[in-house]
Amino acid sequence: DWEIERENIQKLQAKYDQINPKDVIKFSDFPLSKKTLRGLLEGQYRQPTEIQKQTIGFALQGKDVLGAAKTGSGKTLAFLIPDLKDELLKIHRTNIIICTPGRLLQHMDENSTFHASDLHMLVLDEADRILDMGFADTLNAIVENLPKSRQTLLFSATQTKSVKDLARLSLKNPEYVWVHEQA
Ligand code: ADP
Ligand code: MG
């Protein structure tokens, strides 16, 4: 029940400080809930890819992350797995919104019932392409509407370390993770 769930989560959270990507071989080497680990196994995901090994720990620790690794390297699970952790604690009061920048801004501008004031985590996937494809102004407007205290994860297939881009997305002291691997 809810109390036991909360206790289990606290036990896992107590281990976040000790996460060392170098020690991680299996997903179960991360302090993840039994439900998450079971879900991964059922999906035939056994070992984290390099970008997953190097970023899941930072994301669990609440740090901002800027991760770059080529297409097909597994960036989706690198941000979904830590999302899953939050879900248990927040499902009764939070939704996960997956959308394009344009649609999100439309809701902010036109939908009076939509408030982003309780947003905890912003994930920007394909961030390099979002910035390249002329969404910079849209993104600026979105970020202005978001709470300042939030965790931001940014994933892309190429490095986007330009100061301009970071200022725009207002990441705080991000962990840079760049993976160059064959697979
Ligand atoms: P990216 O966003 O980096 O281009 P994806 O997240 O789309 O990559 O993942 C590419 C493919 O790799 C997907 O089919 C996904 O199911 C698979 N995949 C991701 N992580 C793992 C893993 N740890 N083990 C096996 N397959 C994985
Ligand atoms: Mg992707």
Image: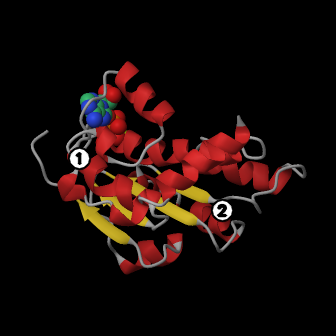
Q: Quadrant of residue 19?
A: bottom left
Labels 1 & 2 near each other (Cβ < 8 A): no
- Circle 1: element type: loop
The label shown at residue 114 is none
Pick the front one: 1 or 153? 1
Q: Quadrant of residue 109?
A: bottom right
Report which residue position mark 2 lands on. Answer: 142
The local crowd at label 1, few if under 14, some if 14 to 19, many if 20 or more residues have their Cα within 10 Å, is some
| In this picture, residue 27 sits left or right of residue 180 | right
Q: Quadrant of residue 68?
A: bottom left
* Residue depicted at x 69% and y 47%: 90
Residue 20: image location, x then y, percent: 26, 61
Residue 41: image location, x then y, percent: 35, 24
Q: Let me know if residue 13 appears in the view.
A: yes
Residue 73: image location, x then y, percent: 25, 41
Give the residue type that dot 1 points to.
Lys
Pick the front one: 29 or 147? 29
Q: Tell me if residue 37 comes above or below residue 142 in the rendering.
A: above
The local crowd at label 2, few if under 14, some if 14 to 19, many if 20 or more residues have their Cα within 10 Å, is some
Of pointers 1 and 2, the one earlier in the residue sequence: 1
Pick the front one: 20 or 66? 20
- Circle 2: element type: helix
Measure the C-alpha gap from mark 1 to mark 2. Answer: 26 Å
Give the residue type that dot 2 points to.
Ile
Q: Say which quadrant the C terminus sits in.
A: top left
* Residue depicted at x 70% and y 54%: 105
Q: Is mark 1 within 8 Å of ligand 1?
A: yes
Report which residue position mark 1 lands on. Answer: 70
* Residue depicted at x 78% and y 46%: 93
| In this picture, residue 117 sits left or right of residue 43 | right
